[in-house]
Image: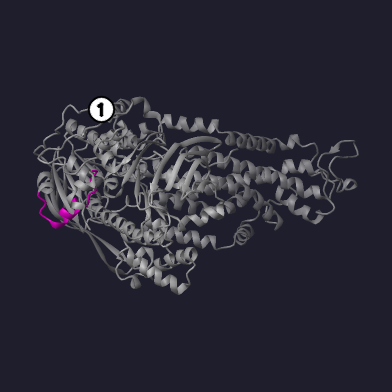
Amino acid sequence: MSASAFNGVLGRVIRNRRILIATALLVIIACVALASKSLAPFDPLQQNLRFRLMPPGSLGADGRMFLLGTDQFGRDAFSRILVGARVPLIVSFSAALLGAAIGLLIGVIAGYFQGWIDSLIGLLIDAQLSIPFVLVGMMVVVLFGPSLHNIVLVFTLLSWPIFARIARDEARLAARQQFVEASLIGGGTTTWILLRHIIPAALPRVIVVAAIQLAYFVVSESAFGFFGLGVPPPEPTWGNILSDSRSYLFQAWWLGLFPGLAIALIAFAANLFASGLNEVVDPASTRGSTF
Amino acid sequence: MKSDAPPNVDLLSVTGLTASFHVKGRIIPVLHDVSFSLKAGETLALVGESGSGKSVTAQSIMRLMRDCSIGGRVELNGKDLLSLSRRDMARVRGREIAMIFQDPRMSLNPTLSIGVQISEVLQRHRGLSAAQARAEALRLLDAVRISGPSRRYDEHPHQLSGGMCQRVMIASAIAGEPRLLIADEATTALDVTVQAEILTLLRELQNETGMAMLVVTHDMGVVAEIANGAAVMRQGRIVEFADTQTLLTRPADPYTQDLLASVPKLGSMAGQAAPRYFPVAGKVPAATDCVVAGQDTILSVRDLNVRYRSRSSFLGISKGSNHAVRGVTFDLRSGETLALVGESGSGKSTIGRAILGLSPVTSGQVILAGQEMTSLRGEPLRQARRAAQMVFQDPAASLSPRQRIRDAISEPLRAWGETGDINAVVHDLLVQVGLEPEMADRLPHEFSGGQRQRICIARAMALRPSLIVADEAVSALDVSVKARICNLLLDIQRQTGVACLFISHDMAVVERLSDRVAVMRNGAILEIGSRRDVFESPQHAYTRALLAAVPNPVPRTSQASISRQ
């Protein structure tokens, strides 16, 4: 892609309102997560059994306010949500990025070349998608132990088939397009066509799915936390905060609500980003909502 | 059949019809004060180029438009259709007004047999029992001249040809005994010989049932064949409304005159040896004759055969093969245009693709600029292919929607690693194809169909090829645009001496553009020779049938070949 076209796409990315809002949200969330240790009003690990399950806005012993209440050990819920953002964000961003990149490459190769390569990759994708997600995750974590790296590895391994399948369909469609044939006749080599026509055609939907997966990973991280397969306590993560809150749902609704809202906010931002990008990358499309 | 309406009263009367689309909160008017009327037993044609509003008019009468506000009056037998409730309107559709569309395969349900689809209409609209409906469906299939209706009754759409599917659509349209049949480009997607059959069928059915027809078409030839009167539309307005005879012989409106002048007329080249420019309205081309072909042979095709193996789904066992191209041999010299004409499935496109190494060749030779192509693979094939470029039918599909046209046109140059001032080359190419160089940074969707085809031609010329394969390159374009693109092709040929393999089903365009013509059927060349020989003294019966089937924009009374009573 030449510089002018790149500027064009970039220009449209900057001018797109959805992308702007979504990026702003994601940047704020990321900054807060990075600076969470210093932003948190309390030590997220500091227990205080006198102030167990206090509702939001309660005052502590020293007159400081528990903004979002406290949990069953009297730890400040707000501080825990702030600090707990780090693990899910790192896990889901890296896994979505890695999974999308691997899946895109494999899928595009399958979809463009078709034939036996496609059959083989298709078989791999189907085989892997038929194995239950959590089961494989458990096996890996049991074998290699729970850690940040292993969680990212598990999520990447488990998500590439989803991306590969989409990239494969898009590449298969694109390969049939006449402009690809026109490029071939114009002297385009296989690499040329893959880089200039097939990958750009497959990319938008892969990014859209990556954004959706991003939100899903944030939730999955909590599922893994629930099974004790996530990053081990006492390190707070939205996952283990959420799973702890389940036991206190009726006494302390705030423990589940606020991390849930945080996850929803990320999912919203990621989806908004995806839909905005979809609009920009496919300028001829008229779809899109009024937002 | 249903002649309760007195013959001299208008069956359909449209008065001051307006329509506006609602797009993203904006209102875009598409029809302005459209008025016309139609008597029972008559046929009116709505004719115009794409975007003229002819289909919108037809769909507004049926109230099929979404996100669209419609004003004015549409009266059918004195009943105002626009003021009917949705329920009442649903009763009018199919029962009083029926409609057939361009693509019969899209309009038929692929999962139901054709008999069932017709019976369904009969049960719904005429309240027949299942047994009665079956008997009536068989009668209708017979009425639309489908042979062996009881055998066909249980067949599915994919087992029938396009023409047969359109007959089935017509059968289900007349099943409700409508007073008015709207045919929206109903023969556009069909081969000329099939189109001629369908037009005859529609005329005969009209004689039998006395229904009125509203025919939406872009083809002046179809107007001449079937309509009593025609309304010429442009930009949502009717610019001329006259009986067919007057319209074709003494058009009053300048736009109609332009439109008729751009229509390639079969036989207008009688006595001419070389290709000629189209007389584009208002401009008489400086040179009317085009280049005389050079002497060096650019392309030789020797005994070319292409077979597609059809596999059964079980274990990929070969079930047999489809012989798409059979023993085709021809030569093409520089500066010459050879037209491959034939109907769909005749193998003409396959030859074009085989020459460029896009289709596998079963046997035979393709020698392009001295290089035998069929044995090449990979990089040597890429190198050899450089001498030939291609222009496709659908310019929208052959340009990437993500690529600026500067990048699209320069892509072959960059793919070949050409250095030097690529922008200057793009500038020159754009000028050559008659576009503004300032347009280089726009995206394809900002251009019209004709402009996009110019861009595709510019891209094809970027590598200075010695052969251009134009696969139905002007078939999808509006008549006035078609004439201009044909002139552009002739211009480029004169300037560069490029040879052209012009693949087309359009006999009238072929007559204008080509030096030599090869008529194809079932993968074989039936007849090849100079254009004059093929058009003025066709040797093969099929060539004569093909020429006779072309609808000509000449009033029917003066056409001897059309009287098929």
Question: Which chain does the numbered disc 1 sit on?
Answer: B
* Relative depth, front residue between B506 and A51: B506
Give the residue at x 52% y 47%.
A100
Task: Give residue B197's quadrant in the image.
Answer: bottom left
Does the magenta run of residues contain B547?
A: yes
Q: Is residue B399 left or right of residue B524?
A: right
Quarter of the figure with the C terminus of chain B: bottom left
Q: Is residue B536 visible?
A: yes
* Residue beneath disc 1: B282
Q: What amino acid is at disc 1?
A: Gly
Which range is magenta?
B537-553
- Location of residue B386 in the rendering, given as x and y in whole percent from the top left corner: 23, 40
Q: Is residue A221 left or right of residue A203?
A: right
- Location of residue B54 in the rendering, given as x and y in whole percent from the top left corner: 39, 42
- Location of residue B160 in the rendering, given as x and y in whole percent from the top left corner: 33, 64
* Relative depth, front residue between B185 and B511: B185
Q: Is residue B533 left or right of residue B142?
A: left
* Relative depth, front residue between A115 and B143: B143
Q: Is residue B380 above or below residue B257?
A: below
Give the residue at x 30% y 64%.
B145
Q: Secondary structure at mark 1?
A: loop
Q: How many marks?
A: 1
Q: Is residue B414 visible?
A: no
